[in-house]
Amino acid sequence: MHHPKEDTTQLVETGKLVGLLNVLLAPVYYANSKWGVTASIAATGATLYLCKKIGEEQRIQESEVESTSVAHIGGFFSGTTAEKKQPKEAIEQTFGDVIAGGSALYNSLMSGASV
């Protein structure tokens, strides 16, 4: 997958967020390694899901600002006339949503603001 260079900063911030989460779960690993792995997988999955939702919301808001109501006229018939996304495009879009949402979540946690 080819990603623009500006995504590198967002990718690092998302990685820091997931890494920090797993460091905070270290006491659970110390208490019981099976529970630690389970907690880590569950917390990482939940965090990535939250990041995806935040990134998806941001993308939708940005596209609404850029588009006009005339562009949405074909939306009613989108199930019959619009082309379906290819799996590769869907994966890249989901990856982009996770990275953008993770970056926004990381920045809001570090600045103390709400998402």
Image (cartoon, rainbow, N blue to C red):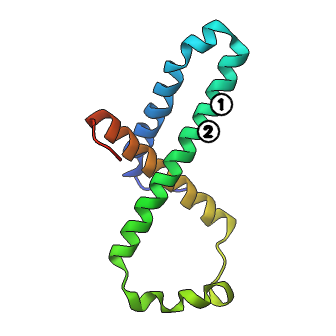
Mark 1 packing: few (<14 Cα in 10 Å), some, or many (20+)?
few
Query: At 69% across and 12% down in the image, what residue appears?
Result: 33
Which residue, as the protein is rendered here, is positioned at the far right? 34
Q: Can you identify the residue that label 1 sits on?
A: 41
- Could you say which is closer to the camera, residue 19 or residue 61? 61
Q: Secondary structure at mark 2?
A: helix
Q: Which mark is residue 45?
A: 2
67 relative to 109, above or below:
below
Q: Quadrant of the N terminus?
A: bottom right
83 relative to 26, above or below:
below
Query: At 54% across and 86% down in the image, what residue appears?
Result: 75
Q: Are marks 2 and 1 in contact (CB under 8 Å)?
A: yes
What is the CA distance from the residue labelled 2 to the residue labelled 1?
Answer: 6 Å
Q: Residue 58 is drawn in which quadrant?
A: bottom left
47 relative to 30, above or below:
below
Q: Secondary structure at mark 1?
A: helix
80 lies left or right of 9: right
Query: At 43% across and 63% down in the image, what residue appears?
Result: 59
- Could you say which is closer to the camera, residue 9 or residue 52? 52
